[in-house]
């Protein structure tokens, strides 16, 4: 599918992976809505990228909030691309703590809601918006790309909520692709491994030194633009549909972190 002339929405578009995705889509000729809660970072990107982007403060779990971002995208051109890279809140923890206390149900929901429910909320509303665009070659109208994690396959100790949310994103991929085939919308998921993003904190050298030895090759963490390159490839290759692609340097999480 041709990116030039299309309109896109990137939830989490002011973050590390999302920001790289926005920049790559703009460079390829798309108009992009940065849908994020990080106002300051998003406004800096608008200044950097100019009229090719717009910012809409967006809560991925809110129907009205996501719809506002999609309406903005529709005003900029035919909506054909949705990329969900937004993060979550709440945290990890073991299913049962050493003192016998069970995992907080509130904390579990605080992870599931943005990562899984929010992803589906964006997917369902984006599919409605994309379905209104005129079909292209092969009847394709657009593509929805979600972000899972390799933790959705092999979550480590203390990641039960996060692993569950990301496994859910993996699981909805083929079902949604089959649902949306009738209107010419593809659904794909990317499952990143360890990427250098703000989620790992500010001491990037220490983070790299911690993770790099565990990664078979290349022996380093991923760069956000490598994620964004995969997004671009998925958009442009219309025969990619209903699949989850790992991008992780062949790392496989064990029960515990590397050290």
Image (tube, rainbow, N blue to C red):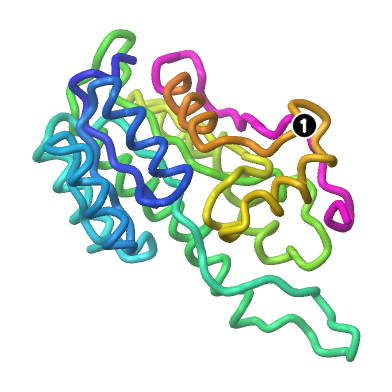
Pinpoint residue 36: horizontal percent, then vertical percent: 33, 57
Mark 1 — residue? Answer: 219
Residue at horizontal 63%, vertical 74%? 108
* Residue 52, magenta (yes or no): no
Q: Say which quarter of the image contains residue 218.
A: top right
Q: Is residue 236 above or below residue 107?
A: above
Pinpoint residue 122: horizontal percent, then vertical percent: 37, 51
Left-right relation of 53 to 38: left
Left-right relation of 222 to 29: right
Q: Is residue 144 above or below residue 10?
A: above
> Closest to the observer: 27 or 192?
27
Pinpoint residue 29: horizontal percent, then vertical percent: 23, 21
Q: Secondary structure at mark 1?
A: loop
Q: Is residue 137 above or below residue 213?
A: above
Left-right relation of 142 to 156: left
> Closest to the observer: 109 or 177?
109
Residue at horizontal 48%, vertical 24%? 229
Tag count in the figure? 1
Residue at horizontal 9%, vertical 40%? 75
Pinpoint residue 236: horizontal percent, then vertical percent: 40, 16
Q: Which contiguous range is marked in magenta?
A: 235-259
Quadrant housing the C terminus: bottom right
Q: Residues within 10 Å of mark 1 (few under 14, many from 20)?
A: some
Q: Say which quarter of the image contains residue 193.
A: top right
Residue at horizontal 13%, vertical 31%? 77
> Closest to the observer: 76 or 44?
44
């Amino acid at each position: 599918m041709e990116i030039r002339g299309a309109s896109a929405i990137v939830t989490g578009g002011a973050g590390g992976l999302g920001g790289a995705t926005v920049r790559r889509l703009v460079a390829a000729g798309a108009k992009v809505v940065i849908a994020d809660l990080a106002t300051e970072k998003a406004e800096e990107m608008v200044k950097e990228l100019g009229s090719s982007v717009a910012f809409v403060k967006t809560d991925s779990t809110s129907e009205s909030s996501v719809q506002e971002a999609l309406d903005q995208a529709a005003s900029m051109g035919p909506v054909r691309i949705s990329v969900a890279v937004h993060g979550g809140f709440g945290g990890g923890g073991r299913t049962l703590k050493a003192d016998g206390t069970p995992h907080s149900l509130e904390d579990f929901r605080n992870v599931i809601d943005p990562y899984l429910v929010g992803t589906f909320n964006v997917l369902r509303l984006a599919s409605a918006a994309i379905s209104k665009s005129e079909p292209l070659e092969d009847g394709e109208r657009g593509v929805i790309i979600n972000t899972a994690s390799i933790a959705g396959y092999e979550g480590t100790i203390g990641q039960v909520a996060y692993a569950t949310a990301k496994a859910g994103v993996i699981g909805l991929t083929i079902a949604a692709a089959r649902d949306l085939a009738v209107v010419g919308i593809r659904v794909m998921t990317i499952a990143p491994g360890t990427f250098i993003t703000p989620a790992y904190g500010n001491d990037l050298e220490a983070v790299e030194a911690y993770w790099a030895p565990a990664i078979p090759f290349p022996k380093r963490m991923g760069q956000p633009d490598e994620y964004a390159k995969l997004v671009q490839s998925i958009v442009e290759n219309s025969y990619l549909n209903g699949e989850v692609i790992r991008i992780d340097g062949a790392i496989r999480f064990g029960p515990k972190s590397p050290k």
